[in-house]
Amino acid sequence: MDNKAMEFSKYRLERAKETLKTAKVIFDIKDYKSANNRAYYAIFYAIRAVLALERKDFKRHKDVIAYFNKNYINTEIFPRKLGHKISLAQSIREDSDYDDKYVASEEKTQTQIKTAEELINKVEEYIENLEK
């Protein structure tokens, strides 16, 4: 394993964890739209942590997620159900950010945060297994 790629991957994973912490703080003050945004970005940064191991990156979110789905979800390196959760998270984030009439619920925001936690844990396990 390329040491620089591993270090960069770990940096991105830490960024995901920090962003998740921010989502939780924002959730606690009941700003659900902003918490949805931060939870989604925690997911996005965790995905990019995996891609960093291949030195792979894309400019557009949809390309990052499509590559991750094709190479890690469809091959079941990560559970398929996680792929569905990631798609839902992206949709909720877009609604929260761009739809003025969207009402972000406490329940959906909790789901976003749980998805981010689940993915971050899975990515952390994946990285640890590669280091062994």
Image: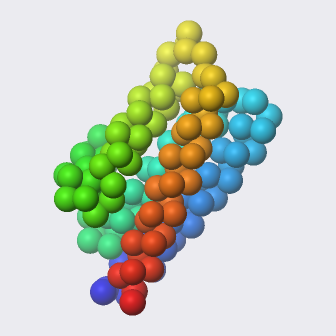
Q: Nearer the viewer, residue 32 or 57?
A: 32
Is 110 left, or right, of 69 in this rendering?
right
Q: Nearer the viewer, residue 14 or 119?
A: 119
Asked if residue 5 can be seen in this view, the reply is yes
The quarter of the picture where residue 47 lies is bottom left
- Residue 13 percent location from the top left of the image: 50, 66
Residue 21 higher or lower than 84, as above or below? below
**What color scheme is it?**
rainbow
Please name the residue shown 80% across and 34% down the image: 29
- Residue 12 percent location from the top left of the image: 48, 65
- Residue 39 percent location from the top left of the image: 56, 44
Please name the residue shown 72% across and 30% down the image: 31
Residue 24 higher or lower than 126, as above or below? above
The quarter of the picture where residue 1 lies is bottom left
Is 18 left, or right, of 119 in this rendering?
right
Quadrant showing the C terminus: bottom left
Q: Number of callouts in the render?
A: 0
Asked if residue 61 can be seen in this view, the reply is no
Residue 7 higher or lower than 52, as above or below? below
The quarter of the picture where residue 6 lies is bottom left
Please name the residue shown 29% across and 40% down the image: 62
Residue placed furthest toward the top = 101
- Residue 10 percent location from the top left of the image: 48, 73
Please name the residue shown 62% across and 29% down the image: 107
